[in-house]
Structures are given as structure tokens and as C-alpha cells.
Amino acid sequence: MSAICGIVSLDGRPVAPSHLAAMVARCQHRLVDEVFYHRQAGMGVACLSRDSSSDGTGACRPEASPDGHLVLVADARLDNREACLAWQPSAFTQRETATDGHLMFGTLLHDPQGGPGRLIGDFAYALWDGGQRTLQLARDAMGMRSLYYRVESGRILFATELSQILAVEGVRRRANRLAMAWHLSDLQTPPGCTFFEGIDEVLPGEEVEIDARGRVRRRVIWKPDPDDRLHYRDSGDYAEHFRALLVEAVRCRSRVASPAAISLSGGMDSGSIASIAGWLAEQGRDMPALRAYSWAFTQHPECDERDNIYRLAKRFSIPVKEIPAEQTYPLMDLSAYVPDEDGPFNLIYQGFVDKVLRGAAADGCRSAWFGFRGDVVVGGSIHELAGLVRDGRWREARHELAGLRHDHGLGRTRGLCRFGIRPVLDDALSLLTRPLRQAPFSDARLSAYSPRDRLPSFVTPDLALRAGLPGRDPLVADSNAWIRASHRERYRQIFSPLVMSVMRLVERQCATHGLVRADPWSDRRLAAFVLACPQHRVDGFRQPKRLARQAVRGIMPDEALQHCRKVMPAPLYEHAIRHLAYDRVLDLMTDSRCAALGLIDEAQYRALFRRHCRGAPQAVDFWPALSLELWLRRWWA
């Protein structure tokens, strides 16, 4: 993946070349092909280019207008190149082989206000207007590229990675206690809240404009429209429409050099991607050859999905490289868990991801495909019984309710109240309070969306107040634009801070191996479609990921589709922390940096862990504090 960085001098003085060089050097862990610089009065930018495209359109280079007043640097992959070609100014050469950055530049010049929202794909860019002396920074709505900035009295710094800003002379490193509190609150640090004071993040789907006086103006360039509604007479039309969008999402990400790696499980998310890619190749489309990297469980056979993996692989002639799960026990190989300076977020199963990326790079792959966002786009256990009733599907609604009651251990009355009556009342109240954008009644009682309620019991009692952690998650307020509870829940899952953190982390880890990350499930067109759908069409208790299953029927092998299921590798984590990595975990809990900062009660922390290892039910999640401890020891020793 490419990266960008730059410095703007607010008083017009020349930018010190050493400062820009420090930002570039700090990003040396990314494998890049070439570094391009552009300097002019009071401004300097750099592009660290890694072109993994099959046609040379992915190069990252500075773009300048003929008069030199406008300069764009962008880390991007455009999915609507054809549309952008039609929006180019007459002075621009209209050629299909133009880089994505060139087409973005032309689109922004053609329509400065609406252009940013027209761009579809994964991107982050900076646009400098030397005439007006303003800097515009923007990111794609799904948060697939990162962009940070710092406004000082005499300059503006921006970069793909926060640590690039820290590398510049004169920037102080001050840890942000609020971000740490958010991290301990179930890894839900919201976009915009960084772990260093004085450094901000451009929010997904946002444009930030900074003028010559250092004044900041923010505006939303794209977000899904809560008033969009889809109502098809034939239920099959939903699946047909979604299928077209999912196929297009895979096709757009296929403009990469061959071969391409895919992290393949036996489930719907990665299985759909592999099947569509293989199907498109059979249709004669120019697709990269896929190489699959898959978990192989022997000691935990209940987690093993190889039977279904090979059903898919055999059908589309995809070679599979098995990664023994026993080599990926969490925290056994700490080299796979070295935290990035930007923040402590890390995956529990990072050992597996590390093996996938190392294997892909060794096999000559230039891209790595994942299906991380599939669960929240079409799964997530979001059930809408009222939608089935409105469609007159009473029998199906009764069966769904019976299954939900049994799964949650509820009687008839409590089950009907929770899954039937309460959501209907919630939707009615939301409709009445919508002009005020107030929280619906039942949502206000959902502790899952209260950051203070999510803090584990071993956190110091006054941390939330001292750090300024709010009692209400801002994502709840954003989701209130949707009338129905099921749509609000879908919005929260798709755009959750946890999902955004996963996207950021995997992008950077791919970049360290010279790979571009691709996740077709993170296409904004899929998100917009699903949020406009009746949610009972998307997911069901008896047919999880109903919409996706219907969409890939005839593409994914029937037997593989029948056996797709959700498997959680929790036994791998539990066996690691209880036995194999017990001493290492206990060491991280002893003389804790988190405790030294007053974040946790160390004695209670260790006591809860020991009880858990003796077989007590896990009442708390230890991973947020463990990952924060790893970060503090690495970067704040």
C-alpha cells in the first residue's frame, strides 16, 4: 500500500527538507517501489508509492495543475474510474490508463464541492491550494485508508501514519488518556480519537479544510442516506440486486497483479469472494489467480473448516496452503504482536494473519484479500420479526421467534416482549422523536452502547470521569437517523470503531509485506444497499446471512453453500491464555504500566485472570488490557 505525508508552512516560509525526510524515513517499514517529492513555496509533500495494480494505474505520485497552484497527493484505489473519466476538465488528458490519483484530481477540479462524495473506492488524499493557501484532507467513508494531521501555530503536518507526524522535529509525544479509556471499553476507540494529544484523525467520509490561519472546517462528504428505502415485490429481486453489487465489488478489486492471496475459511464471507472471483474468471474476465491460505485445526477439530474450504478450492482450482493452528496460538510468538506506535489495537488471532501475509509475500503475491466486514454487512444476528409480519409471513415469524426464545433461554412472554413488542414500540417512538434526533427508549437502556458500562471490573472506579469518557457512545447518536431499530443496529455494526480499527491494522500489516489489502465487503455500495433493505431480508435466525446466501446461489458450489457456517476459534485463545501462554500473560499483568498510570487495579486484574484459568466463567475480556500493556511497554518504557 502507498502512503502520503506533507508539511504546510502557514507563514509561507520554506519547509525544511529534513523534516519531510523524517516523515518518509519513519514509514520505511512499508515496502514501497519509489518515493516522489513535490516542493514549492511554503509547502512540501511526499508520496511513498507501491503500485500493486496490473495496469500501472495504482501508482502514487503528486499531481499538479498547469499553473502549479493546486497539488494533490493521494493513496487511492478508484472503483468508478469510468464515471471519473467523464468528469475530467477539458485541460486534462482523458485516457483510460491514467492513474487513479490523476482521475481523482480531475474530478475534484471539475466539482470541488460534490467531487469528493462522487469518489468510490478506498482513498485518503490531501489537496493544497497555493492561491487560497488552504489544505483539504479527506478519507473514504468506509475508513479503508488512514489520514492524520496536526495544526500548530506555524505549520500543518499530515500523514498516512500518525507516527510519521511524531517523527518531525518539535512534535511532542503526549499520551491521550481518553483514548486509552476508550480502548479498555471493548476496543471501541472511535475514529478521530487518537492516542496522542494534539494529533487528529480525518474521520471516514469526512473532508477537513484548514486555512492560512490554522482554522479547521469539517464537512461530511458521504454517508448512507437513512431515507433510502428498497421495496421489491419479488423477494428474489433483493438477492439479484445484491449479487450484482457484490460481483462488482470483487471485480473492482481485481485490478491487481497476479497471483493474489486470499485468507480463506469455510464460511460465507471469504467463501463468497473466492467463488465470485473464480466464477468471473470462468466468464472470461481478467482476474488474478488466487492462492488460498487457511487455518488447519487438529487439536481443536470443532474449529476446523477444511472440508468446506476444499469444496470451494477444488471447484475453482485454487491451491490451498494450510497454516497449522498450533503455530498461531495467541501470544506464543510475540514477534507477531509487536504493536504499532500509532496505537495499541491488535487482533487476538494476529499470529494467523501474520502467517498469511508472510506466506503470501514469499509466494510472490502483491495483494491480500479478506472478508472481515462480511459479518457486519450481512450477518450480525440482527432479527426483524416485525418485517416478516408486515410481509404476511406469520408462520416464518413464529418459527424465528421460537428459535430466538430457545437460543436466549426465554419464556413465551419474555421472548415475545424482547423480540416482538419492544422493537415495534421502539420504532414507533423513534418516528415520533426523529425531528429531535433523540435516542429511542429501548436503545437508551442498551449497556452494550455505553462506553462506561463496557469497562471491565478491574478498571479503576474513577477512570471514566478522570479520562472524560462519555456515558453515551457517539455512534448511537449517529444511528438515530434511522427509524427502525434493526437498521440502527446494522449501521452501528458496519461503522463500529472496532471494525474501523481492524481495517486500519490489516492495511498497515499488509503494507509491511508489500501487499495491498482488499476487502470487497467494505464497499460503500454494499453498505448503502443493506441499510436500505428490510432487515428481515438480510439476516435470519434459521438462515444466517440470508441475503448473501441467496445472492451467491449458482456461483458458490451448492454443497459448500449448504455447509457454510460461522466458526469461532475461541478454543485457541482459551487454551493459549490458560495453559501455553499463562506465564506470559501473568507477566504482562505484573508490574503493569496500565496500573502505574492508574488505569487498572492490578491485584483485581490478576485475581480475575487466575479464577478464569481455574475454570470460572469469563466475566470480562482480558484482551483490551493485554494489548494496551504490550503497547505501553513497547512505546512508553
Image: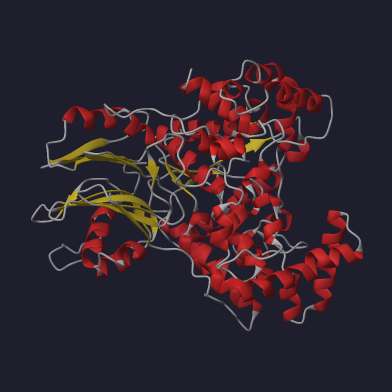
Res. 323 visible in picture: no
Looking at the picture, the colour scheme in use is secondary structure
- In this view, the residue farthest toward the bottom is 233
Query: In which quadrant will I find the N terminus?
Result: top left
Q: Nearer the viewer, residue 270 or 291?
A: 270
Left or right: residue 154 compared with residue 309: left
Identity of the residue drawn at 12% across and 38% down: 13
What is the total number of numbered labels drawn onto the structure image?
Answer: 0
Left or right: residue 71 compared with residue 190: left
Percent coordinates x, y for residue 370 in the rendering: 53, 47
Identity of the residue drawn at 37% across and 46% down: 257
Q: Is residue 185 above or below residue 228?
A: above
Q: Is residue 355 above or below residue 75?
A: above
Percent coordinates x, y for residue 232 in the rendering: 60, 81
Percent coordinates x, y for residue 425 in the rendering: 73, 72
Res. 511 visible in picture: yes
Left or right: residue 17 compared with residue 201: left
- Write down the quadrant of residue 118 in the picture: bottom left
Identity of the residue drawn at 29% across and 27% down: 25
Q: Nearer the viewer, residue 635 or 120?
A: 635
Percent coordinates x, y for residue 126 in the rendering: 27, 49
Identity of the residue drawn at 60% across and 52% down: 472
Q: Nearer the viewer, residue 505 or 286?
A: 505
